[in-house]
Amino acid sequence: AKSSTVTITIASPGVVSWTAHGLLAGSQVRLTTTGALPTGLAANTTYYVIAVDANSFQLSATQSGTAINTSGSQSGTHTMTARSITAQLLATIL
């Protein structure tokens, strides 16, 4: 699966920066961190991409949902992994 270190803004809504991510709107992603994620996001939870541009995007908790607002503070290195299309299809079917 495709993954990268990302940065996340504390904003309404929060914006994820991932250079040349190549993800489409509706792509499923998950986050891990060596520290703490901003309030509003949780590690090992599936989120959906709301495409913004080639290097950044917003996240939603549901397919075609509203963008998540982030608050509080964050620490550590955040890594985002895009779920493969096969995993996405299996999750839909099962």
Image (cartoon, rainbow, N blue to C red):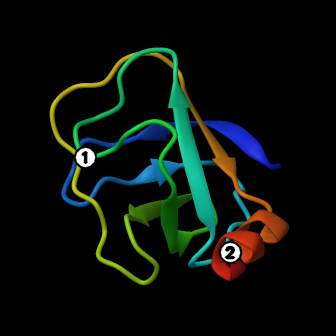
Tag 2 and tag 1, C-beta contact below 8 Å: no
Instruction: Label 2: state its secondary structure.
Output: loop
Residue drawn at (70%, 57%) of the image: 21
Q: Image height check: is 87 above or below 26?
A: above
Residue occupying the point 59% across, 55% down? 29
Q: Where is residue 80 in the image (x, y as percent from the top left)?
A: 61, 42
**Neighbourhood count class around disc 1 (C-alpha, 10 Å): few under 14, some 14–19, many 20 upward:** few
Q: Name the residue under label 2.
A: 94
Q: Label 1 belongs to which residue?
A: 40
Please rate how many residues cluster around mark 2, counting C-alpha atoms within 10 Å: few if below 14, some from 14 to 19, many from 20: few
Kindly identify the amino acid type of the residue bearing the numbered disc 1. Answer: Gly
- Which residue is rendered at x = 38% and y = 67% of the image? 60
Mark 2 or mark 1: which comes first in sequence?
A: 1
Give the Cα distance between marks 2 and 1. Answer: 27 Å
Q: In which quarter of the image is residue 61?
A: bottom left
Residue lying at 67% horizontally and 70% vertically, measured from the top left:
91
